[in-house]
Amino acid sequence: GACGSEKKEIPKQIYIGVACYDQRDTFLGELLENFKRECRTLEKRGYDISLTIMDAANSQRTQDDQVQEMIGNGCDILCVNLADRTDPSQIITAAQEHDIPIIFFNREPVEEDLMQWEKLYYVGCDAEQSGIMQGEIAAEYINSHSEVDKNKDGKIQYVLLEGEAGHQDAISRTEYSVKTLMKNDVILEKLSYQLADWNRGQAENRMNRLISQYGKEIELVMSNNDEMALGAVEAYRKAGYAREDWPVIFGIDGLEEALEAVKAGEMQGSILNDRVDQAKEMAKMAVELFEGEDFEQESLKEGRYYFSEYQKVDGSNIDEYLNAEETISHSGM
Ligand code: GAL
Ligand code: CA
């Protein structure tokens, strides 16, 4: 060029292939919406992003094939939300053969697998933190509201709704929420643990059965996520119980509908799972990996892991979070 600048303003083309375990999952759907939005903002920074999102409908076999297909189509970066988090080996082998970095997200591979090759990363949360926080807000509520103990026996009769068997978040949330309640002087009596696959309808069915079995005896529902907590809310609505006969209900994710339920007094709290921040980090990493930047350093745990911070939401701060979707990311880029 005349002024000595040799640079042309041709957008750099990046093809990002995204593989999802199941797009019907509400939290994941929101995470993907945010990711698409982040990719559009990258276009303003001079990248031409082409995005393919494939849904494995819960089958690892299907996902393995979908990843092969995206590799065959020339993708530069893979973002993978494993169907079976213990079985990423086919995908890793295929990606490594073609030297395509993988950003795993939301469903954490075991460490041994992630360390198999240096171009494997993970974006998600520290599941233990969400369990501890959920236990803390529940304990705080129970300790300051004696009416939660409806039958006045000094114990809290509780039900726990669990996500998917074997999922890192379900395991840690169950373990740490209960431990934290006990640590904070809540005496618990377990009525039932029910697996409901992160799913609202399944949780509603499980709760219906428990309501017919235990009637008003249930004083607390701890749920591994908001969708299932909302299933419990729905079951109580339909059962037609007066509000003082409901248990207190706690979820995780900070979905808009759950926040509305907290505002309405149908749920008592949730833990925000920061999908805005996770989506931002994924997009940022995708570009950095594309540019060949090496970030085996400070920002990532063990050079591989990015964990966004969970945040507690309950009656005390609900207004800050309700209808504030675009501001929920407090950690920023
Ligand atoms: C969790 C989230 C759940 C579900 C699950 C899927 O982090 O809290 O609602 O989306 O991921 O892997
Ligand atoms: Ca009781």
Image (cartoon, rainbow, N blue to C red):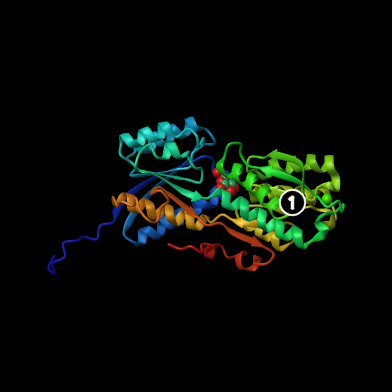
Residue 289: % across, % down: 33, 49
Q: Nearer the viewer, residue 173 or 246?
A: 173
Left or right of residue 275, residue 295 in this image: left
Q: Position of residue 262 (x, y in %)?
A: 70, 60
Which residue is depicted at the point 45% across and 53% down? Answer: 36
Q: Quadrant of the C terminus?
A: bottom left
Residue type marked 1 = Val
Between 154 and 73, the residue placed more toward the observer is 154
Specify whether tag 1 is near ligand 1 (CB below 8 Å): no
Which residue corresponds to mark 1? 233
Q: Is residue 255 visible?
A: no
Residue that appears at 57% across and 65% down = 324
Please identify the quadrant where the N terminus is shown: bottom left
Res 299 visible: yes
Is residue 72 placed above or below 269 in the rendered structure? above
Kindly identify the residue that appears in the image at 43 percent across and 55 percent down: 281
Seen at 47% across and 32% down, the residue is 87
Task: Return the x and y of residue 9 as percentages of the image width and height.
Answer: 24, 61
Res. 170 image quadrant: top right
Residue 61 relative to residue 157: left or right: left
Q: Count neighbours of disc 1 (C-alpha within 10 A) and say few if under 14, some if 14 to 19, many if 20 or more.
A: many
Q: Is residue 196 above or below residue 234?
A: above
Q: Position of residue 101 (x, y in %)?
A: 35, 43
